[in-house]
Image: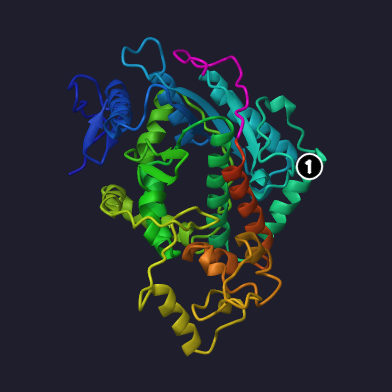
Amino acid sequence: MTCERNSACKKCSQEKASVVLRTKDPYCQGCFLKYATHKFRATLGKSKLVRPKDRILLATSGSQSSVALLHMVSEGLSEQNNKRFLFTSLAVHIDEGAVTGLSRDERVEALKAVAKQAEDLNFPFYTVQLSNSLNLNPTSILDVNAKVEDIDLNENRIVAGDEQLTSLFCKTRTLTSKEDLLGKLRQNLLMAVAKELGCNKILLGDNGSQLAVKLIANVSIGRGAHLPWDIGFCDVRDSGVMILRPLKEFMGKEIAFYCVFNKLSAVPLPSLSTKTFRMASIRRLTEDFLFGLHADFPSTFSAVIKTGDKLALPTEGSARCVLCKVALDQQNRECSSQQATQFSKELVGKISSKDEVWSNDCVLESDDPSGSDSRSQGDIIGGSMSSKAGCSKLKDCLCYGCCLIVADMDDGGALLNGILSIDEKCSEAAITAIPLSSNLPCGQEKS
Protein backbone atom coordinates (compact mmCIF):
# COMPACT_ATOMS: atom_id res chain seq x y z
CA MET A 1 0.00 0.00 0.00
CA THR A 2 1.46 3.33 -1.07
CA CYS A 3 0.92 6.72 0.53
CA GLU A 4 0.02 9.92 -1.30
CA ARG A 5 1.97 13.14 -0.74
CA ASN A 6 -1.21 15.03 0.20
CA SER A 7 -1.66 12.76 3.23
CA ALA A 8 -1.18 14.11 6.73
CA CYS A 9 2.24 13.86 8.35
CA LYS A 10 2.56 10.60 10.30
CA LYS A 11 4.45 12.40 13.09
CA CYS A 12 2.40 15.51 13.87
CA SER A 13 -0.83 14.56 12.03
CA GLN A 14 -1.41 18.26 11.31
CA GLU A 15 0.71 19.40 8.36
CA LYS A 16 0.49 18.04 4.84
CA ALA A 17 3.21 15.59 3.87
CA SER A 18 6.10 17.07 1.90
CA VAL A 19 7.99 13.81 1.42
CA VAL A 20 7.06 10.13 1.50
CA LEU A 21 9.75 7.69 2.64
CA ARG A 22 9.67 3.94 1.97
CA THR A 23 6.40 4.50 -0.01
CA LYS A 24 4.37 4.48 3.23
CA ASP A 25 5.79 7.05 5.68
CA PRO A 26 4.64 10.65 4.98
CA TYR A 27 6.48 13.52 6.70
CA CYS A 28 5.97 17.26 6.65
CA GLN A 29 9.04 19.41 6.15
CA GLY A 30 9.54 20.25 9.82
CA CYS A 31 9.14 16.69 11.08
CA PHE A 32 11.40 15.32 8.35
CA LEU A 33 14.21 17.70 9.28
CA LYS A 34 13.84 16.76 12.97
CA TYR A 35 13.88 13.09 11.99
CA ALA A 36 17.05 13.55 9.89
CA THR A 37 18.85 15.55 12.59
CA HIS A 38 17.97 13.00 15.27
CA LYS A 39 19.13 10.10 13.08
CA PHE A 40 22.48 11.80 12.42
CA ARG A 41 23.12 12.65 16.06
CA ALA A 42 21.99 9.21 17.22
CA THR A 43 24.34 7.50 14.76
CA LEU A 44 27.30 9.43 16.15
CA GLY A 45 26.14 9.20 19.75
CA LYS A 46 25.51 5.47 19.99
CA SER A 47 28.93 4.72 18.51
CA LYS A 48 30.63 6.58 21.42
CA LEU A 49 33.65 7.13 19.19
CA VAL A 50 33.57 10.93 18.88
CA ARG A 51 35.15 12.76 21.83
CA PRO A 52 34.94 16.47 22.80
CA LYS A 53 38.64 17.10 22.15
CA ASP A 54 38.73 15.34 18.78
CA ARG A 55 40.00 17.17 15.73
CA ILE A 56 37.90 15.95 12.80
CA LEU A 57 38.46 16.24 9.06
CA LEU A 58 35.27 16.53 6.99
CA ALA A 59 35.87 15.16 3.50
CA THR A 60 33.82 17.12 0.97
CA SER A 61 33.46 16.58 -2.76
CA GLY A 62 30.72 19.15 -3.32
CA SER A 63 28.02 16.48 -3.76
CA GLN A 64 24.65 16.46 -2.02
CA SER A 65 25.88 13.99 0.60
CA SER A 66 28.97 16.10 1.32
CA VAL A 67 27.15 19.40 1.71
CA ALA A 68 24.48 17.67 3.84
CA LEU A 69 27.23 16.32 6.11
CA LEU A 70 28.76 19.79 6.45
CA HIS A 71 25.36 21.28 7.28
CA MET A 72 24.52 18.63 9.90
CA VAL A 73 27.87 19.07 11.63
CA SER A 74 27.52 22.87 11.46
CA GLU A 75 24.08 22.64 13.08
CA GLY A 76 25.54 20.45 15.81
CA LEU A 77 28.29 22.98 16.44
CA SER A 78 25.83 25.86 16.65
CA GLU A 79 25.63 27.74 19.95
CA GLN A 80 21.82 27.67 19.75
CA ASN A 81 21.87 23.93 20.22
CA ASN A 82 21.90 22.84 23.86
CA LYS A 83 23.64 19.58 23.04
CA ARG A 84 26.16 20.98 20.61
CA PHE A 85 29.22 19.13 19.42
CA LEU A 86 32.43 20.01 21.24
CA PHE A 87 34.97 18.74 18.73
CA THR A 88 36.98 20.84 16.27
CA SER A 89 36.44 20.31 12.56
CA LEU A 90 37.65 21.49 9.17
CA ALA A 91 36.73 20.71 5.55
CA VAL A 92 39.09 19.21 2.96
CA HIS A 93 38.46 18.79 -0.76
CA ILE A 94 40.54 16.63 -3.11
CA ASP A 95 40.81 18.01 -6.64
CA GLU A 96 40.32 15.05 -9.02
CA GLY A 97 39.76 17.13 -12.14
CA ALA A 98 42.93 15.89 -13.83
CA VAL A 99 41.50 12.36 -13.86
CA THR A 100 37.88 13.19 -14.70
CA GLY A 101 38.84 15.33 -17.70
CA LEU A 102 38.06 18.85 -16.47
CA SER A 103 39.93 21.81 -17.92
CA ARG A 104 42.03 23.97 -15.60
CA ASP A 105 39.43 26.76 -15.67
CA GLU A 106 36.66 24.31 -14.81
CA ARG A 107 38.72 22.91 -11.95
CA VAL A 108 39.31 26.38 -10.49
CA GLU A 109 35.59 27.21 -10.71
CA ALA A 110 34.73 23.91 -9.03
CA LEU A 111 37.24 24.58 -6.24
CA LYS A 112 35.74 28.02 -5.62
CA ALA A 113 32.22 26.57 -5.49
CA VAL A 114 33.19 23.84 -3.00
CA ALA A 115 35.13 26.38 -0.93
CA LYS A 116 32.03 28.62 -0.79
CA GLN A 117 30.00 25.69 0.55
CA ALA A 118 32.42 25.27 3.45
CA GLU A 119 32.84 28.99 4.11
CA ASP A 120 29.05 29.57 4.18
CA LEU A 121 28.89 27.03 7.00
CA ASN A 122 31.91 28.58 8.80
CA PHE A 123 34.36 25.74 8.23
CA PRO A 124 38.07 26.29 7.55
CA PHE A 125 38.62 24.98 4.02
CA TYR A 126 41.62 23.20 2.52
CA THR A 127 42.17 21.67 -0.89
CA VAL A 128 44.80 19.23 -2.11
CA GLN A 129 45.60 17.84 -5.56
CA LEU A 130 45.06 14.12 -6.14
CA SER A 131 48.54 13.92 -7.68
CA ASN A 132 49.96 14.27 -4.16
CA SER A 133 48.96 10.64 -3.64
CA LEU A 134 51.82 9.70 -5.99
CA ASN A 135 54.35 11.63 -3.86
CA LEU A 136 55.58 13.81 -6.69
CA ASN A 137 56.92 16.54 -4.41
CA PRO A 138 60.29 15.35 -3.06
CA THR A 139 60.42 17.91 -0.23
CA SER A 140 56.94 17.45 1.23
CA ILE A 141 54.48 14.61 1.53
CA LEU A 142 51.55 16.90 0.82
CA ASP A 143 50.76 20.32 -0.52
CA VAL A 144 47.64 21.50 1.29
CA ASN A 145 46.32 24.91 0.32
CA ALA A 146 44.27 26.99 2.75
CA LYS A 147 43.15 29.55 0.13
CA VAL A 148 41.74 28.75 -3.30
CA GLU A 149 43.11 32.06 -4.61
CA ASP A 150 46.64 30.82 -3.91
CA ILE A 151 46.29 27.81 -6.22
CA ASP A 152 47.95 28.10 -9.60
CA LEU A 153 47.07 25.02 -11.66
CA ASN A 154 49.53 26.14 -14.32
CA GLU A 155 52.42 25.82 -11.88
CA ASN A 156 55.08 23.46 -13.24
CA ARG A 157 54.89 21.15 -10.23
CA ILE A 158 51.10 20.75 -10.49
CA VAL A 159 51.24 20.32 -14.26
CA ALA A 160 53.85 17.58 -13.87
CA GLY A 161 51.74 15.87 -11.23
CA ASP A 162 48.62 16.01 -13.40
CA GLU A 163 50.52 14.54 -16.34
CA GLN A 164 51.85 11.63 -14.32
CA LEU A 165 48.44 10.99 -12.77
CA THR A 166 46.73 11.09 -16.16
CA SER A 167 49.36 8.77 -17.61
CA LEU A 168 48.79 6.31 -14.77
CA PHE A 169 45.05 6.13 -15.44
CA CYS A 170 45.58 5.92 -19.20
CA LYS A 171 47.73 2.83 -18.61
CA THR A 172 44.88 1.23 -16.64
CA ARG A 173 42.82 -0.66 -19.17
CA THR A 174 39.33 -1.10 -17.66
CA LEU A 175 36.98 1.41 -16.04
CA THR A 176 36.45 -1.01 -13.15
CA SER A 177 40.12 -0.88 -12.22
CA LYS A 178 40.25 2.89 -12.73
CA GLU A 179 37.37 3.46 -10.30
CA ASP A 180 38.89 1.09 -7.75
CA LEU A 181 42.31 2.73 -8.07
CA LEU A 182 40.82 6.23 -7.71
CA GLY A 183 39.03 5.20 -4.53
CA LYS A 184 42.22 3.84 -2.97
CA LEU A 185 44.32 6.88 -3.93
CA ARG A 186 41.64 9.20 -2.55
CA GLN A 187 41.44 7.33 0.75
CA ASN A 188 45.23 7.19 1.19
CA LEU A 189 45.47 10.91 0.50
CA LEU A 190 42.70 11.76 2.96
CA MET A 191 44.44 9.83 5.72
CA ALA A 192 47.75 11.53 4.94
CA VAL A 193 46.08 14.96 4.92
CA ALA A 194 44.41 14.20 8.25
CA LYS A 195 47.80 13.43 9.79
CA GLU A 196 49.29 16.54 8.20
CA LEU A 197 46.57 18.71 9.74
CA GLY A 198 46.65 16.98 13.11
CA CYS A 199 43.22 15.31 12.77
CA ASN A 200 42.52 11.96 14.41
CA LYS A 201 39.19 11.23 12.70
CA ILE A 202 37.68 11.60 9.23
CA LEU A 203 33.97 11.91 8.49
CA LEU A 204 32.90 10.75 5.02
CA GLY A 205 29.64 11.64 3.29
CA ASP A 206 28.91 8.15 1.95
CA ASN A 207 25.17 7.47 2.24
CA GLY A 208 23.41 4.11 2.49
CA SER A 209 22.54 3.92 -1.22
CA GLN A 210 26.16 4.44 -2.23
CA LEU A 211 27.44 1.96 0.35
CA ALA A 212 24.98 -0.72 -0.80
CA VAL A 213 26.30 -0.39 -4.35
CA LYS A 214 29.87 -0.45 -3.04
CA LEU A 215 29.20 -3.62 -1.02
CA ILE A 216 27.97 -5.65 -4.00
CA ALA A 217 30.62 -4.20 -6.34
CA ASN A 218 33.47 -4.91 -3.90
CA VAL A 219 32.44 -8.55 -3.60
CA SER A 220 32.55 -8.77 -7.39
CA ILE A 221 36.07 -7.31 -7.66
CA GLY A 222 37.67 -9.50 -5.00
CA ARG A 223 37.40 -7.26 -1.93
CA GLY A 224 34.80 -9.25 -0.01
CA ALA A 225 37.16 -9.92 2.90
CA HIS A 226 37.51 -6.17 3.54
CA LEU A 227 33.82 -5.20 3.53
CA PRO A 228 33.65 -4.35 7.28
CA TRP A 229 36.27 -1.63 6.65
CA ASP A 230 35.02 -0.49 3.25
CA ILE A 231 31.30 -0.13 4.03
CA GLY A 232 31.08 -0.23 7.84
CA PHE A 233 30.45 2.75 10.10
CA CYS A 234 34.00 2.69 11.47
CA ASP A 235 37.21 2.01 9.53
CA VAL A 236 40.29 1.56 11.72
CA ARG A 237 42.76 0.19 9.19
CA ASP A 238 45.10 3.06 10.14
CA SER A 239 45.86 3.22 13.86
CA GLY A 240 46.46 6.98 13.70
CA VAL A 241 43.27 8.02 11.87
CA MET A 242 39.76 6.61 12.27
CA ILE A 243 37.30 6.90 9.36
CA LEU A 244 33.59 7.26 10.21
CA ARG A 245 30.53 7.19 7.94
CA PRO A 246 27.75 8.97 9.89
CA LEU A 247 25.36 9.09 6.87
CA LYS A 248 25.35 5.31 6.59
CA GLU A 249 21.72 5.12 7.75
CA PHE A 250 20.53 7.72 5.20
CA MET A 251 19.30 6.73 1.76
CA GLY A 252 20.01 8.91 -1.28
CA LYS A 253 16.38 10.16 -1.38
CA GLU A 254 16.57 11.37 2.23
CA ILE A 255 19.81 13.26 1.51
CA ALA A 256 18.26 14.88 -1.57
CA PHE A 257 15.21 16.15 0.36
CA TYR A 258 17.39 17.32 3.25
CA CYS A 259 19.33 19.51 0.80
CA VAL A 260 16.13 20.81 -0.83
CA PHE A 261 14.48 21.76 2.48
CA ASN A 262 17.66 23.48 3.74
CA LYS A 263 18.32 25.18 0.39
CA LEU A 264 21.73 23.53 0.02
CA SER A 265 23.24 23.51 -3.46
CA ALA A 266 25.53 20.73 -4.65
CA VAL A 267 28.47 21.28 -7.00
CA PRO A 268 27.97 19.09 -10.08
CA LEU A 269 31.29 17.39 -10.81
CA PRO A 270 31.77 14.53 -13.29
CA SER A 271 33.04 11.13 -12.23
CA LEU A 272 34.91 8.48 -14.21
CA SER A 273 31.59 6.80 -15.07
CA THR A 274 29.74 9.97 -16.11
CA LYS A 275 27.91 9.47 -19.44
CA THR A 276 28.95 5.82 -19.65
CA PHE A 277 26.60 2.95 -20.50
CA ARG A 278 25.39 0.51 -17.85
CA MET A 279 27.93 -2.21 -18.75
CA ALA A 280 30.95 0.12 -18.62
CA SER A 281 32.16 -1.13 -15.24
CA ILE A 282 31.19 -3.51 -12.44
CA ARG A 283 30.27 -0.62 -10.16
CA ARG A 284 28.17 1.05 -12.89
CA LEU A 285 26.32 -2.20 -13.61
CA THR A 286 25.76 -2.86 -9.90
CA GLU A 287 24.39 0.66 -9.45
CA ASP A 288 21.97 0.24 -12.37
CA PHE A 289 20.80 -3.14 -11.04
CA LEU A 290 20.24 -2.04 -7.43
CA PHE A 291 18.47 1.21 -8.31
CA GLY A 292 16.21 -0.70 -10.71
CA LEU A 293 15.43 -3.22 -7.98
CA HIS A 294 14.87 -0.42 -5.44
CA ALA A 295 12.16 1.10 -7.64
CA ASP A 296 9.95 -1.95 -7.02
CA PHE A 297 11.29 -2.98 -3.61
CA PRO A 298 11.99 0.10 -1.43
CA SER A 299 13.83 -1.92 1.22
CA THR A 300 16.55 -3.08 -1.18
CA PHE A 301 19.31 -0.75 0.00
CA SER A 302 18.60 -1.15 3.71
CA ALA A 303 18.52 -4.95 3.33
CA VAL A 304 21.91 -4.95 1.62
CA ILE A 305 23.41 -2.66 4.27
CA LYS A 306 22.02 -4.71 7.16
CA THR A 307 23.46 -7.85 5.60
CA GLY A 308 26.85 -6.18 5.34
CA ASP A 309 26.70 -5.15 9.01
CA LYS A 310 26.58 -8.81 10.02
CA LEU A 311 29.97 -9.55 8.47
CA ALA A 312 32.72 -10.15 11.02
CA LEU A 313 36.11 -8.48 10.87
CA PRO A 314 38.90 -10.74 9.61
CA THR A 315 41.78 -11.64 11.88
CA GLU A 316 44.31 -8.80 12.04
CA GLY A 317 47.77 -9.49 10.67
CA SER A 318 51.03 -7.63 10.92
CA ALA A 319 51.54 -7.37 7.15
CA ARG A 320 49.38 -4.87 5.27
CA CYS A 321 48.66 -4.13 1.63
CA VAL A 322 50.82 -1.20 0.50
CA LEU A 323 47.97 0.23 -1.59
CA CYS A 324 44.75 -0.11 0.43
CA LYS A 325 46.38 -0.68 3.87
CA VAL A 326 44.18 -3.64 4.88
CA ALA A 327 45.63 -6.66 6.66
CA LEU A 328 46.91 -9.33 4.28
CA ASP A 329 45.60 -12.86 4.51
CA GLN A 330 48.69 -14.82 5.55
CA GLN A 331 46.94 -18.05 6.45
CA ASN A 332 48.28 -21.04 4.56
CA ARG A 333 45.07 -22.58 3.28
CA GLU A 334 45.08 -25.70 1.17
CA CYS A 335 42.50 -24.10 -1.11
CA SER A 336 41.53 -20.47 -1.65
CA SER A 337 39.67 -18.47 -4.28
CA GLN A 338 42.94 -17.03 -5.56
CA GLN A 339 44.47 -20.49 -5.98
CA ALA A 340 41.29 -21.71 -7.67
CA THR A 341 41.40 -18.81 -10.10
CA GLN A 342 45.03 -19.46 -10.90
CA PHE A 343 44.40 -23.17 -11.41
CA SER A 344 41.53 -22.44 -13.81
CA LYS A 345 43.74 -20.16 -15.90
CA GLU A 346 46.46 -22.78 -16.08
CA LEU A 347 43.91 -25.46 -16.92
CA VAL A 348 42.53 -23.65 -19.96
CA GLY A 349 46.03 -22.70 -21.08
CA LYS A 350 45.45 -18.96 -21.09
CA ILE A 351 47.91 -17.92 -18.45
CA SER A 352 50.00 -14.91 -19.49
CA SER A 353 53.32 -13.60 -18.29
CA LYS A 354 51.54 -11.02 -16.13
CA ASP A 355 49.43 -13.69 -14.51
CA GLU A 356 52.60 -15.46 -13.44
CA VAL A 357 53.34 -12.51 -11.16
CA TRP A 358 50.52 -13.62 -8.89
CA SER A 359 51.20 -17.37 -9.07
CA ASN A 360 51.50 -19.01 -5.66
CA ASP A 361 54.24 -21.26 -6.99
CA CYS A 362 56.63 -18.41 -7.83
CA VAL A 363 59.82 -18.24 -5.74
CA LEU A 364 61.93 -15.12 -5.53
CA GLU A 365 65.44 -15.54 -6.87
CA SER A 366 67.89 -14.25 -4.29
CA ASP A 367 71.63 -13.83 -4.21
CA ASP A 368 71.64 -14.70 -0.54
CA PRO A 369 72.95 -18.28 -0.13
CA SER A 370 70.65 -18.77 2.84
CA GLY A 371 67.65 -18.24 0.58
CA SER A 372 66.37 -15.25 2.52
CA ASP A 373 65.51 -11.99 0.81
CA SER A 374 67.55 -9.14 2.26
CA ARG A 375 66.09 -6.47 -0.02
CA SER A 376 63.53 -4.00 1.19
CA GLN A 377 59.89 -4.05 0.13
CA GLY A 378 60.54 -1.02 -2.05
CA ASP A 379 63.37 -2.82 -3.88
CA ILE A 380 61.09 -5.74 -4.60
CA ILE A 381 58.35 -3.50 -5.96
CA GLY A 382 60.75 -1.30 -7.85
CA GLY A 383 62.06 -4.23 -9.83
CA SER A 384 58.76 -6.02 -10.13
CA MET A 385 57.77 -4.56 -13.46
CA SER A 386 61.22 -4.65 -15.03
CA SER A 387 62.55 -8.11 -14.20
CA LYS A 388 60.85 -11.45 -13.96
CA ALA A 389 63.01 -12.41 -11.01
CA GLY A 390 61.92 -9.42 -8.96
CA CYS A 391 58.16 -9.69 -9.55
CA SER A 392 57.37 -12.92 -7.80
CA LYS A 393 56.87 -11.46 -4.32
CA LEU A 394 54.33 -8.78 -5.22
CA LYS A 395 51.59 -10.99 -3.83
CA ASP A 396 53.24 -10.56 -0.42
CA CYS A 397 52.80 -6.76 -0.64
CA LEU A 398 49.30 -6.50 -2.10
CA CYS A 399 45.89 -7.90 -1.27
CA TYR A 400 44.00 -9.85 -3.91
CA GLY A 401 41.87 -6.86 -5.00
CA CYS A 402 44.92 -4.61 -5.46
CA CYS A 403 46.71 -7.40 -7.34
CA LEU A 404 43.92 -7.25 -9.90
CA ILE A 405 44.37 -3.48 -10.29
CA VAL A 406 48.11 -3.75 -10.93
CA ALA A 407 47.62 -6.74 -13.25
CA ASP A 408 45.25 -4.57 -15.30
CA MET A 409 47.90 -1.84 -15.72
CA ASP A 410 50.58 -1.60 -18.41
CA ASP A 411 53.07 -0.36 -15.81
CA GLY A 412 52.26 -0.59 -12.10
CA GLY A 413 55.78 -0.12 -10.81
CA ALA A 414 55.58 3.69 -10.64
CA LEU A 415 52.29 3.53 -8.74
CA LEU A 416 53.54 1.07 -6.14
CA ASN A 417 56.84 2.87 -5.62
CA GLY A 418 55.02 6.17 -5.01
CA ILE A 419 52.50 4.68 -2.60
CA LEU A 420 55.19 2.81 -0.70
CA SER A 421 57.31 5.97 -0.47
CA ILE A 422 54.42 7.89 1.13
CA ASP A 423 53.72 5.02 3.51
CA GLU A 424 57.35 4.86 4.66
CA LYS A 425 57.58 8.65 5.16
CA CYS A 426 54.36 8.75 7.16
CA SER A 427 55.63 6.05 9.48
CA GLU A 428 59.18 7.33 9.89
CA ALA A 429 58.82 11.11 9.97
CA ALA A 430 56.90 13.19 12.51
CA ILE A 431 54.28 15.19 10.65
CA THR A 432 53.86 18.82 11.60
CA ALA A 433 50.33 20.21 11.49
CA ILE A 434 49.71 23.24 9.29
CA PRO A 435 48.37 26.26 11.22
CA LEU A 436 44.65 26.68 10.59
CA SER A 437 42.91 29.89 9.65
CA SER A 438 41.22 31.84 12.41
CA ASN A 439 37.64 31.56 11.12
CA LEU A 440 36.75 28.47 13.16
CA PRO A 441 33.11 27.35 13.39
CA CYS A 442 31.10 28.67 16.29
CA GLY A 443 31.57 26.57 19.37
CA GLN A 444 35.08 25.46 18.41
CA GLU A 445 38.37 26.30 20.01
CA LYS A 446 41.85 26.38 18.61
CA SER A 447 43.91 23.43 19.66
Pointer 1 local density, CA inside 10 Å: few below 14, some 14–19, many at least 20? few
Q: In this view, does 108 lie to the left or right of 197?
A: right
**Residue occupying the point 53% across, 21% down:** 123
How far from the left and from the top, in percent, is residue 122? 53, 18
Q: Mark 1 highlights which residue?
A: 157
Image quadrant holding the N terminus, namely top left
**Residue occupying the point 66% across, 57% down:** 417
Hey, which residue is sitting farthest right in the picture?
156
Question: How many tags in the picture?
Answer: 1
Indicate whether 322 appears above or below 387. above
Splitting the image into 4 quarters, where does residue 432 fall?
Answer: top right
Colour logic: rainbow
Type of secondary structure dominating the magenta stretch = loop
Indicate whether 416 appears above or below 79. below
Splitting the image into 4 quarters, where does residue 408 fall?
Answer: bottom right
Q: Is residue 234 left or right of residue 425?
A: left
Indicate whether 240 appears above or below 122. below
Task: Look at the image and tell me whether residue 172 can be seen.
Answer: no
